[in-house]
């Protein structure tokens, strides 16, 4: 979207006001230094995101004063609607999920996700009258078929709202860490009621009205499938109560398994993405995760499959195509190629862009990448058809024209790859001598065939050398 020239704001961060954070701090002897422990964990996450090329505009921590101000403002707005009342909660609570859990959801007396016994609670808490918004939620989902995606999650949420969406406890009496309930500091705000509001406070709610008005409502929430009922039932009900517009769309991604097995510390099969990057490079890992897994479904990571994709798509695909073209371009007598506008090549590039952008509009990055790989395959066939190495022996002008078309095709491919593999795209731009031209322009201009002047062409380093 940045490449398109869209005005964008990418927010991510961490929820810090949870009981499991206290548990984790206590395990390493920092139970009396929770804030220090959270600072340490936040630094780890921020460093990890930076090392993986995550281009977020802001990283929010829910212990920030701005967030606390926004939560208090939001609470008072919901309270003013008469949607918060005092009551008594008795039941089970899973610390891993940070969720009140029904007895019917337990498997052998345990949380099915975290495989641990829930706590039995009896507390006097504040409740949010979520059930008042059941009908409005169902109506909104029906009128906005793209609000919840993929379709399987939409059906899941509808069933949950129809059969299980009741008033929810939104404070904790025994919790000693968190944001105090306005006018009742003996209780703290329930972590989910607090954490969801970060989507507002991260863009100014409660502290910068102009900023908030500019960015809300958001176009897209990306969430894990296990927390979709919070984002597609509780969260919109909260917003309805507070009189704030709902997000345009919530998209739930699936889980990753490792060689068909769930990631588990006990099995010792957890994979650190940072370690993969050290061996195979950042762009190779980003490519694999976004190409291999159908976004919205579950996917499997295996080193065997990773190696296969690396060799077929990256080493023999992207890397080989770019390398072939740059190597042939080095044989031109004139450093500035001339263009021969072959309508069939232009049409094929236009088709690739259309497929690519439509895939992004459907939140299908895997299909967008498939369109790029197909365009590269087309480029390879074009080389075999034109046989520029033979043309060079007899017609230097024709050779230069063919190379102009191929170099522009390489540039187009690099633009398509940029959101997925930014480092690779930038290497290609340097080899084409167009890096400076690409820094400040947007997609609508950059993707126009032949409007960017190819500069001094250099071969550069191999993009994806065989492993």
Image (tube, rainbow, N blue to C red):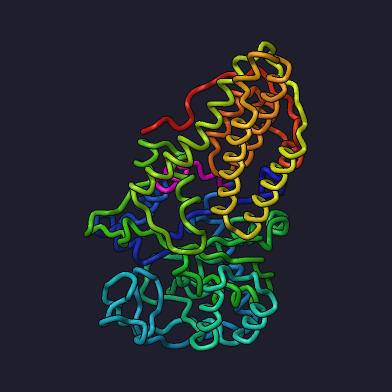
Quick check: 78 left or right of 271?
A: right
Residue drawn where x is 22% and y is 59% of the image: 266
Image: magenta residue range: 44-56
- Judged left or right of residue 345, residue 222 is left
Which residue sits at x=34%, y=64%? Answer: 20
- Would you identify the image quadrant in which residue 324 lies? top right
Compare residues 284 and 97 and report the one nearer the observer: 284
Judged by its main secondary structure, the magenta piece is: helix
Residue shown at 39%/44% (left/top)?
Answer: 308
Position of residue 399 relative to residue 89, above or below, is above
Residue projecting furthest to the top:
333
Whether residue 296 is in magenta: the answer is no
Spot occupied by residue 216 in the image (x, y as percentages of width and height): 68, 61
Q: Is residue 418 visible?
A: no
Residue at image point 59% right, 47% down: 57
Q: Is residue 47 above or below residue 147?
A: above
Residue 408 can be seen in this image: yes
Q: Nearer the viewer, residue 399 or 120?
A: 399
* Rendered location of residue 280, percent (x, y): 39, 37
Is the residue 422 above or below the residue 156 in the image?
Answer: above
Left or right: residue 38 versus residue 372 is left
Question: Which is nearer the eye, 406 or 244?
Answer: 406
Q: Quadrant of residue 412?
A: top right
Where is residue 152? Give x, y as percent. 52, 73
Q: Is residue 47 magenta?
A: yes
Number of numbered markers: 0
């Amino acid at each position: 979207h940045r490449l398109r020239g869209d005005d964008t704001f990418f927010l991510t961060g961490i929820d810090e006001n949870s009981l499991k954070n206290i548990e984790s701090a206590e395990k390493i002897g920092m139970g009396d230094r929770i804030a220090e422990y959270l600072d340490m964990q936040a630094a780890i996450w921020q460093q990890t995101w930076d090392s993986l090329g995550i281009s977020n505009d802001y990283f929010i921590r829910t212990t920030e004063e701005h967030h606390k101000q926004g939560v208090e403002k939001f609470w008072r707005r919901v309270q003013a609607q008469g949607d918060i009342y005092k009551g008594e909660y008795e039941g089970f609570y899973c610390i891993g999920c940070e969720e009140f859990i029904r007895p019917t959801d337990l498997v052998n007396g345990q949380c099915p996700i975290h495989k641990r016994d829930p706590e039995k609670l009896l507390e006097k808490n504040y409740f949010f009258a979520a059930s008042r918004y059941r009908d409005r939620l169902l109506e909104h989902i029906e009128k906005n078929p793209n609000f919840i995606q993929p379709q399987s999650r939409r059906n899941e949420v509808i069933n949950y709202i129809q059969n299980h969406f009741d008033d929810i406890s939104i404070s904790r009496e025994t919790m000693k860490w968190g944001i105090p309930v306005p006018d009742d500091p003996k209780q703290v705000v329930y972590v989910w009621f607090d954490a969801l509001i970060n989507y507002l406070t991260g863009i100014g709610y409660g502290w910068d009205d102009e900023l908030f008005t500019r960015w809300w409502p958001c176009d897209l929430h990306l969430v894990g499938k296990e927390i979709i009922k919070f984002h597609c039932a509780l969260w919109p009900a909260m917003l309805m109560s507070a009189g704030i517009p709902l997000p345009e769309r919530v998209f739930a991604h699936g889980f990753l398994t490792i060689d068909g097995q769930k990631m588990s510390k006990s099995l010792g099969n957890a994979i650190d993405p940072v370690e993969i990057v050290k061996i195979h490079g950042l762009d190779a890992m980003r490519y694999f995760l976004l190409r291999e897994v159908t976004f919205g479904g579950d996917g499997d990571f295996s080193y065997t499959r990773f190696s296969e994709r690396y060799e077929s798509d990256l080493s023999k695909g992207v890397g080989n195509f770019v390398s072939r073209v740059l190597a042939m371009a080095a044989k031109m007598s004139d450093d500035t190629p001339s263009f021969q506008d072959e309508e069939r090549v232009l049409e094929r590039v236009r088709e690739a862009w259309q497929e690519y952008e439509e895939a992004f509009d459907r939140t299908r990055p895997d299909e967008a990448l498939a369109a790029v790989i197909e365009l590269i395959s087309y480029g390879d066939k074009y080389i075999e058809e034109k046989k520029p190495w033979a043309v060079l022996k007899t017609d230097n002008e024709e050779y230069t024209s063919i190379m102009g078309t191929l170099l522009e095709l390489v540039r187009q491919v690099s633009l398509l790859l940029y959101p997925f593999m930014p480092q690779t795209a930038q290497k290609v731009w340097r080899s084409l001598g167009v890096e400076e031209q690409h820094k400040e322009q947007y997609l609508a201009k950059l993707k126009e065939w032949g409007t960017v002047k190819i500069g001094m062409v250099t071969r550069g380093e191999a993009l994806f050398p065989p492993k």
